[in-house]
């Protein structure tokens, strides 16, 4: 199909280039400039219904990745796996799940991005090597992957994917050591943010990077062990939360039970602040901090730092609802559902009309005219990336009759790219990297604009009092990266991104 943009059409026509409208939306050219989480992982060890548990666990983690998903199980004889492009409910059905036999499993959901929509990059990645079958999945990004990949290729390794996860499999396979020692030595070479699940027959290994940038929790369901990127997935399957996997920790499960080990010491805890601000579900807990409660505190802190007289408070769904409630409670200004999200705009196989393409954002978000008309509105959002979405939403509220639109953001200005597992654009595309707050206000057509202070954010989340930044990574706000970053080589996206 020829894009009409090349024949005088609109820029939005570029989304009708694949099998369905908006295929790959979420990358650098998205009309919705929200950040994208890399992915989510889920693991089961010691339960006869491992595949079905993984299905429901991945469904609970669907917000962390909507492009592809997969499950790999292991029984006494072999691995069984299935991967596909699309949502969990689209990729798996009863027959596919029944074919995934075994009492252990690892699963993965991958985020949506333009340019790397390949089944080959869907996880878990499954390999055969001298030790048998090996399956690997991860959430995060390896900063030094390009250098390690080149080293491996120069010494004869042949890569089948563009995913940095495959580097781990090569490092393990080339090691003369036993599996656990090979994994420890491989992880010790990695720089970046990651949460890994590795599976062989009769063994499951879980690990987090030495800074804990990417979350991973452990739970139990009867005698079975469960691992997940977020605690909400444990709740979904009825598992009991046990604890978070600690930075630099290596947990090994086999027929003898759980073995606690380490591949690196924790030098500095630096949990991604955006997990608390935006990515994780509000019913999840990260290192003992509930996301809904922390977001409410962000809204309350915003109200203390930047009160404005208004008639109603509304949040941009879904991640900003909790903060909007907190802002409303702190100020006494009524909270209203001034914006409604359409949850069913994902994969549309019917090309919308030219008019709908022009109004593309309204396919995903709508203003409630009877709520905002004639009102001074405080609009709470979690971040501003390029500013294009904020401009559209502010204008949407004005078109619905809002007299004033005051924008309040529950994070500091997002000025720097992330190298640890968030799909962020080039620094030049981040509006806060080149504009002042006043210039951003003008660009998004708001009556006023305020970003939550660094201190206000840290205090709202809470965390570890004795640690630097209370155990948070704030690099996207203050340029203080917890690991060395070779900016020329480092990829800002992972999980199979080109």
Image (cartoon, grey):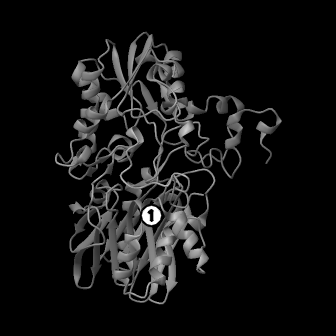
Viewer-nearest residue: 228 or 478: 478
Residue at (44% x, 30% y) in the render: 340
Judge from the rendering whether residue 420 lies leftward or rightward of residue 296; answer left or right. right
Q: Position of residue 222 (x, y in %)?
A: 21, 71
Q: Which quadrant, please, contains the C terminus?
A: bottom right
Q: Could you tell me which secondary element the residue under label 1 belongs to? A: strand
Q: Position of residue 306 (x, y in %)?
A: 30, 20
Judge from the rendering whether residue 428 lies leftward or rightward of residue 234; answer left or right. right
Viewer-nearest residue: 76 or 308: 308
Residue marked by disc 1? 108
For this orientation, the residue located farthest to the right is: 7
Q: Position of residue 400 (x, y in %)?
A: 50, 17
Total count of labels: 1
Viewer-nearest residue: 401 or 460: 460
Q: Position of residue 22 (x, y in %)?
A: 62, 44
Alpha-carbon neighbours of circle 1 within 10 Å: few (<14), some, or many (≥20)?
many
């Amino acid at each position: 199909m020829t894009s009409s943009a090349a024949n005088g059409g609109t820029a939005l026509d570029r989304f009708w280039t694949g099998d369905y409208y908006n295929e790959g939306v979420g990358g650098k050219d998205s009309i919705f400039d929200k950040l994208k989480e890399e992915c989510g992982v889920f693991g089961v060890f010691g339960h006869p219904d491992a595949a079905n548990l993984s299905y429901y666990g991945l469904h609970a983690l669907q917000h962390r990745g909507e492009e592809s998903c997969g499950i790999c199980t292991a029984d006494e004889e072999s691995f069984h796996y299935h991967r596909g492009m699309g949502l969990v409910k689209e990729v798996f059905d009863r027959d596919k799940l029944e074919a995934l036999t075994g009492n252990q499993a690892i699963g993965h959901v991958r985020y949506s991005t333009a340019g790397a929509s390949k089944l080959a990059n869907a996880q878990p990645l499954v390999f055969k090597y001298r030790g048998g079958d090996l399956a690997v999945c991860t959430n995060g990004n390896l900063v030094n992957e390009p250098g390690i990949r080149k080293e491996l290729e120069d010494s004869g390794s042949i890569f089948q994917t563009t995913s940095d996860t495959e580097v781990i499999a090569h490092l393990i396979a080339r090691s003369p050591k036993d599996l656990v020692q090979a994994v420890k030595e491989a992880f010790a070479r990695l720089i970046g943010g990651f949460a890994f699940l590795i599976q062989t027959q009769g063994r499951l290994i879980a690990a987090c990077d030495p800074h804990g940038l990417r979350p991973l929790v452990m739970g139990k369901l009867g005698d079975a062990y469960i691992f997940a990127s977020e605690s909400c997935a444990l709740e979904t399957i009825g598992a009991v939360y046990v604890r978070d996997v600690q930075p630099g920790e290596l947990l090994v499960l086999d027929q003898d039970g759980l073995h606690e080990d380490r591949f690196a010491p924790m030098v500095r805890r630096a949990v991604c602040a955006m997990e608390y601000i935006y990515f994780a579900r509000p019913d999840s807990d990260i290192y003992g901090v509930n996301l809904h409660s922390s977001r409410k505190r962000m809204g309350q802190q915003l109200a203390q730092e930047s009160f404005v007289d208004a008639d109603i408070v509304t949040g941009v769904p879904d991640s900003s609802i909790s903060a909007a409630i907190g802002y409303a409670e702190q100020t006494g200004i009524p909270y209203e559902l001034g914006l409604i999200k359409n949850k069913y705009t994902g994969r549309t196989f019917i090309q919308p009309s030219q008019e709908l393409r022009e109004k593309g954002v309204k396919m995903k978000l709508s203003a409630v005219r009877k709520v905002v008309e004639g009102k001074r509105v405080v609009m709470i959002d979690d971040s501003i990336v390029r500013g294009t979405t904020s401009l559209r939403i502010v204008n949407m509220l004005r078109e619905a009759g809002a007299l004033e639109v005051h924008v309040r953001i529950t994070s500091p200005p997002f000025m720097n790219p992330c190298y640890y597992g968030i799909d962020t654009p080039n620094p030049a595309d981040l509006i806060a990297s080149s504009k002042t707050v006043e210039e951003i206000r003008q660009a998004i057509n708001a009556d006023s604009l305020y970003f939550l202070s660094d201190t206000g954010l840290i205090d709202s989340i809470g965390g570890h009092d004795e640690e630097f930044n209370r155990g948070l990574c704030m690099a996207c706000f203050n340029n203080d990266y917890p690991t060395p970053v070779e900016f020329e080589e480092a990829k800002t996206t992972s999980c199979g991104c080109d």
